[in-house]
Image (cartoon, rainbow, N blue to C red):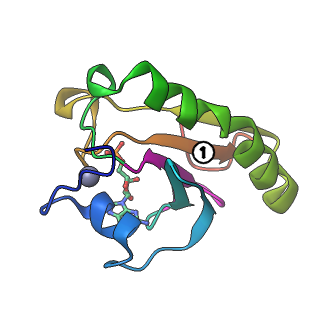
């Protein structure tokens, strides 16, 4: 149950290795990878390995496992890309801009007013 996959989900395919990705971090519970259409340099996504579409669908344990590694991943992005700041963002639901129905948190490094995002 915990590793339940959705056959039609692009992020489940990435987690399974059926679609290639640039991996940033992986453990038993989560997978982090570079966004294929980065809003800024270093744009990264983290997902639970279990397919959950929306924030309401996450168990508290799944949320805890995911957020447990957020500081480590953010620090690695900061070290590698040296942004001035970083937005952590979740689009929850199609009407909120979610285009992939597998919960994901964006790390969007920011480089100043000219970085083209927001
Ligand atoms: P959303 O709009 O759902 O919040 O974010 C989905 C993100 O997934 C987008 O930033 C999009 O560029 C990224 N994305 C969509 N398909 C793929 C893919 O096949 N590989 C990777 N690495 N990122 C993807
Ligand atoms: Zn999925």
On the rendered structure, is 108 left or right of 53? Answer: right
25 with respect to 58 (left or right) = right
Tell me, yes or no, if residue 111 can be seen here.
no
- Which of these two is toward me, 27 or 43? 27
Left or right of 110? Residue 84 is right
Give the quarter of the image for residue 62. Answer: top left
Instruction: Quickly name the residue at label 1.
Output: 108
Q: How many marks?
A: 1
Can residue 19 be seen in this snapshot?
yes
| Front residue of this view, candidates 61 and 33 | 61
Q: Farthest residue toward the front? A: 1
What span is colored magenta in the figure? Answer: 38-49
Q: Which residue is outermost to the left? A: 8
The image quadrant where one finds the N terminus is: top left
Membership of 69 in magenta stretch: no
In the displayed structure, would residue 26 be above or below residue 85? below
Q: Is residue 14 above or below residue 77?
A: below
Query: Residue 32's x, y, as percent?
Result: 55, 56
Q: Is residue 40 magenta?
A: yes
The percent position of residue 23, horizontal first and vertical second, equals: 57, 69
- Residue at left 27%, top 30%? 54
Using a 10 Å C-alpha cutoff, classify the residue at mark 1 as few (fewer than 14 neighbours), some (14 to 19) or many (20 or more).
many
């Amino acid at each position: 149950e915990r590793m339940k996959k959705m056959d039609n989900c692009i992020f489940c395919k990435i987690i399974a290795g059926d679609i290639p990705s640039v991996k940033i971090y992986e453990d038993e519970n989560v997978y982090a990878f570079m966004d294929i259409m980065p809003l800024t340099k270093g744009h990264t996504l983290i997902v639970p390995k279990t397919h959950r579409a929306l924030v309401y669908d996450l168990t508290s344990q799944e949320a805890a496992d995911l957020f447990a590694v957020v500081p480590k991943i953010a620090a690695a992005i900061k070290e590698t890309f040296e942004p001035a700041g970083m937005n952590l963002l979740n689009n929850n639901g199609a009407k909120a801009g979610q285009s992939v129905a597998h919960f994901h948190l964006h790390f969007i490094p920011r480089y100043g007013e000219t970085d083209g995002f927001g």
